[in-house]
């Protein structure tokens, strides 16, 4: 189960990109990121949610931790892969949204599950921005077992696509922007 084991991987990002430039008002290293929406399954306050919290690291990285509980099992004593993918979606989305301050949704999310993740373990996830190409934002993340320098258990790569705020109001709740602002008043006053 060495993390050096070669795996067939396609080039990433898959298209030519610009370097990702954090927004001038992006939170700096050490900032503990706020919940972006209090009913979010990943970071919100919902019973049964993942309750993930993220912190901005150096070099436009975002660090998140996800502790696997009995409520997250797939096989006995082991995390469900789909739930792990969800934790990565949250960490990657948090990096994209907070560092670029651009509203974006996940268009594609790819995960490599390299090691089993047992109940009681904590995944230390580091997400980073890899490049942008117009509305397309590429990001990737590693999840290490039980410490920031533990073995990599899960890797993920994602494409986020920037959307207008109308994406949320026309496909979700009509009052989506009020709901976002109720949780984080200033963030959603930015112009996309
Ligand atoms: C702002 C402050 C934020 C604060 C913090 C926030 C934290 C958030 C944390 C939350 C975390 C949780 C986050 C969540 O859970 S987000 C929820 C899960 N995601 C969704 O619901 C998204 C559903 N999909 C859509 O709405 C549309 O399909 C989108 C908007 C994605 C694109 O439809 P649209 O009609 O608008 O655009 P387009 O189709 O012309 O595509 C545009 C470009 O993208 C390329 N493309 C698209 N899809 C794929 C694909 N699968 N593989 C490869 N490429 C793909 C496409 O080829 C094109 O490229 P090009 O031809 O231009 O070269």
Image (spheres, helix red, strand yellow):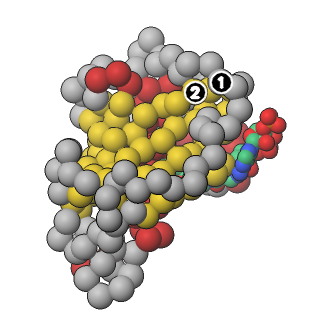
- Whether residues under marks 1 and 2 lie with C-beta atoms below 8 angstroms apart, the answer is yes
Which one is nearer the viewer's eye here, 178 or 107?
Answer: 107
Q: Residue at x 63, y 51 (%)?
A: 108
Residue bearing mark 2: 131
Query: Which residue is the extreme one toward the bottom?
Result: 76
Query: Which residue is the extreme one toward the top?
Result: 24
Q: Residue at x 48, y 31 (%)?
A: 129
Q: Residue at x 62, y 35 (%)?
A: 13
The answer to whether residue 162 is left or right of residue 5 is right
How would you rate the neighbour count of disc 1 (Cα within 10 Å): few for under 14, some for 14-19, many for 20 or more?
A: some
Which one is nearer the viewer's eye here, 74 or 186?
Answer: 74
Split into 4 quadrants, where in the image is the N terminus?
bottom left
Which disc, if any, is residue 17?
1
Within 8 Å: ligand 1 and the Cβ of disc 2? no
Q: Residue 137 at what x, y percent from top left?
A: 61, 33
Which disc, if any, is residue 183?
none
Q: Secondary structure at mark 2?
A: strand
On the question of residue 179 being in view, the answer is no
- Cα gap from disc 1 to disc 2, whole angstroms: 5 Å
- The quadrant in which residue 173 appears is bottom right
How would you rate the neighbour count of disc 2 (Cα within 10 Å): few for under 14, some for 14-19, many for 20 or more?
A: many
Q: Residue 53 at what x, y percent from top left?
A: 28, 47
Which one is nearer the viewer's eye here, 165 or 31?
Answer: 31
Q: Secondary structure at mark 1?
A: loop
Residue 7 vertical placement versus 92 (above, below): below
Q: Residue at x 56, y 46 (%)?
A: 158
Which image quarter has ligand 1?
Answer: top right
């Amino acid at each position: 189960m060495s993390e050096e084991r070669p795996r067939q991987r396609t080039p990433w990002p898959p298209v030519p990109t610009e370097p990702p430039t954090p927004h001038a008002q992006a939170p700096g290293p050490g900032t503990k990121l706020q919940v972006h929406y209090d009913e979010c399954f990943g970071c919100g306050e919902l019973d049964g949610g993942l309750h993930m919290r993220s912190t901005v690291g150096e070099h436009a990285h975002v660090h998140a931790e996800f502790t696997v509980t009995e409520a997250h099992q797939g096989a006995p004593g082991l995390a469900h892969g789909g739930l792990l993918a969800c934790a990565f979606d949250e960490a990657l989305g948090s990096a994209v949204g907070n560092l670029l301050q651009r509203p974006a949704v996940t268009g594609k999310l790819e995960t490599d599950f390299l090691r089993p993740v047992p109940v009681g373990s904590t995944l230390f996830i580091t997400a980073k921005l890899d490049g942008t190409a117009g509305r397309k934002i590429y990001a990737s993340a590693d999840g290490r077992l039980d410490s920031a320098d533990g073995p990599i258990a899960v890797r993920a790569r994602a494409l986020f696509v920037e959307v207008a705020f109308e994406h949320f109001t026309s496909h979700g709740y009509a009052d989506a922007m009020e709901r976002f602002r109720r949780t984080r008043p200033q963030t959603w006053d930015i112009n996309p």
